[in-house]
Image: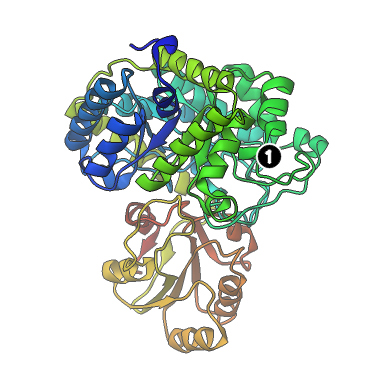
Amino acid sequence: MESLNGMSLRQKIGQMLVTGFPGTETDLAFEALVREYKVGNIILFRRNQRDMAQLETLCQSLAAFMEAETGLPPFITSDEEGGVVSRLPADMAKMPSAMAQAALGDAARVEEAARLTARELLGVGINFNLAPVLDVNSNPENPVIGVRSYGATAEAAAQYALAAFEGYRQEGILTTGKHFPGHGDTNTDSHLALPVVEKSLEELEGLELVPFRAAIKAGIPAITIAHVLFPALEARRVPATMSHTIITGLLRQAMGFEGLVISDCMEMDAIKRFYGVDKGTVEAVKAGMDLVFISHTPTEVEGAVHALEQAVDSGELPMARIDDAVGRIMEYKRRYIHPGQKVSSGEMAGLRSFATKFTSDAIAASCPVGQGSFALGGAPLFVSPLRSHVTLVSNVVNGDYSFAGAMQQRFGGEAFVMGMEPDEEEQAHILKLAAGCSSLVLGTVNGNAYPAQLRLAGALAKTGIPLACVALRNPFEIELLPEGVFRLALYEYAPETVELAMDYFKKD
């Protein structure tokens, strides 16, 4: 393993960067980044993972190639939160989303889910899981956190996120708490724009910072910084990612965090569109960032390397800041990168069974006591939007799939695919289709944030025809439905969860 003193500036900068590539095998552009720019870490997405055997082979080849070219083993990272943010292939186990896990009120089960997730990640060679989420989802209209959060209160978010962290720790995988100092009270997706949280430090201390303080006390090894503006904390009006006041002043000095500080992807529009990846990366490192994610575009990685080199050469960025970051990275590689034990086919079957049961039980917990099952009759009408990306961080989806179509295929009747905000004409058409039906089943997607869906639910309820409403993503609209409506929450709009939901419906 390289020593810090024997490394060139380019080698050091390479250790501070994380990037990816587009397919199931490395391409020439990625290999050039490793050979020429000494990029020392990788992020894997769903696009890189065909099945468990391929993923294991890929991780082995990445580890060997990157260590040979850079002198250090790589962090092999992935976002495996569960549910809507899961990168693993279909033949591996995927736990439900954080909010679904917490819905059962069983912290021990959350801990076990994390332990099993760590077990399978390490088994294929992924040594750094970009989880758990520590955000408090205090804003039901938040487009990017939602079901990724363990709770709408600081206490719930902290309790279950720390249970997950404990499960990860038991297996020895590196993890990160995200997104500091809090992404839960935004109504903007930082993948697409630059969110602003207009809260004082005192207000943040009472809510958003509570889970982070608890995680730091528990020994969480890394924290991810949010691409969010906090004007009351940072007078320069730059996002937390680029704020020395927030990273060094608040997180390091005031809160005493000594672990790895890592960025969200610098190609998200909150940084790329408003500041540029090059400038954003330099400012992030100056602010105290250790590990910078530039996840997709080789030219952006190259530009960031040159920008960091120029900043050091000009004296804008002290070499001591680089050495501080790289020294910490090397220490955490020494602690956390170790061979994982391969998961047998029998053990993987058990992991998948655990995950399916956990998901099923979370759906059951959303079903009011005494509700039972919903009788469809001989002529049901199923209505829903298509499955789509609510946020770019979510899993890749098949845009032709719909809850309505899947239900029709299983139970017969009629299906209608509506828009996310059905206008008056579309709602009138759906009401016309409803006439004479034996039952109505409406699938909603974040209906509290798309009120036309709830207006449709109200109009369908007034027909007097038995109505069921299935919340396919965030569950918040469940509490806003008219009395007497059959209700169910899936937490994830996916074929697997829809299949589980079908158990709550019967033909007569």
Residue 309 against residue 452 in the figure, above or below: above
Which of 342/79 is in front? 79
Name which residue type carries label 1: Thr
Name the residue rendered at 45%, 54% in the picture.
Answer: 392
Name the residue rendered at 44%, 70% in the picture.
Answer: 385
Residue under numbered circle 1: 153
Residue 506 pos. (x, y %): 35, 64
Q: Quadrant of the N terminus?
A: top left
Residue 96 visible (yes or no): no
Residue 349 pos. (x, y %): 23, 33
Which of 479/286 is in front? 286
Q: Quadrant of the C terminus?
A: bottom left
Name the residue rendered at 54%, 75% in the picture.
Answer: 421
Which of 237/221 is in front? 237
Mark 1 surroundings within 10 Å by alpha-carbon count, few (fewer than 14), some (14 through 19), many (20 or more): some
Q: What secondary structure is found at the residue carrying circle 1?
A: loop
